[in-house]
């Protein structure tokens, strides 16, 4: 799964820690999502999409092998 989380954070001028606080997870979780090491739960993906006022599909994209 690919994502544009780092780009979205830059646009909103948010640090990983600030985003983590907004969606109630650790900064390490945000880092793992951005680096593709962790796929967020549906609930977390929805919380993240709400922060950026975008759909989940605009932030997270499936790869062909997903």
Image: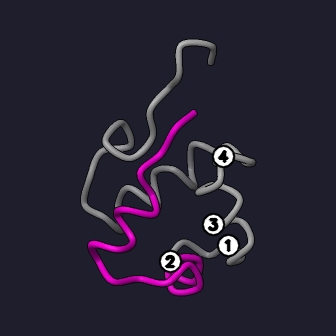
Query: Local crowd at mark 3 within 10 Å, few (<14), some, or many (≥20)?
Result: many
Residue 2 appears at what percent x and percent y? Answer: 52, 38
Q: Residue at left 26%, top 52%?
A: 54
- Mark 1, Cα crowd under 10 Å, few <14 / some 14-19 / many 20+, is few
- Work out whether 5 lies above or below 31: above
Q: How many angstroms separate mark 4 from mark 1 (CA)?
A: 16 Å
Of the image marks 1 and 2, the number of the one nearer the N terminus: 2
Q: Residue at x 71, y 59 (%)?
A: 32
Q: Are marks 4 and 1 in contact (CB under 8 Å)?
A: no
Discs 1, 3 touching: Cβ within 8 Å:
yes
Which residue does the numbered mark 1 point to in the structure image? 25
Residue 20 painted magenta: yes
Residue under label 4: 36
* First to last magenta residue range: 1-22
Q: Which residue is mark 2?
A: 19
Magenta stretch: dominant SS?
helix
Which numbered mark, 1 or 3, is in the foreground of this view? 3
């Amino acid at each position: 799964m690919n994502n544009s989380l780092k780009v979205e954070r830059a646009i909103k001028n948010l640090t990983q820690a600030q985003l983590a606080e907004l969606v109630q997870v650790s900064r390490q979780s945000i880092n793992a999502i951005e680096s593709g090491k962790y796929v967020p739960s549906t609930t977390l993906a929805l919380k993240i999409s709400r922060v950026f006022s975008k759909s989940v599909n605009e932030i997270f994209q499936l790869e062909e092998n997903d």
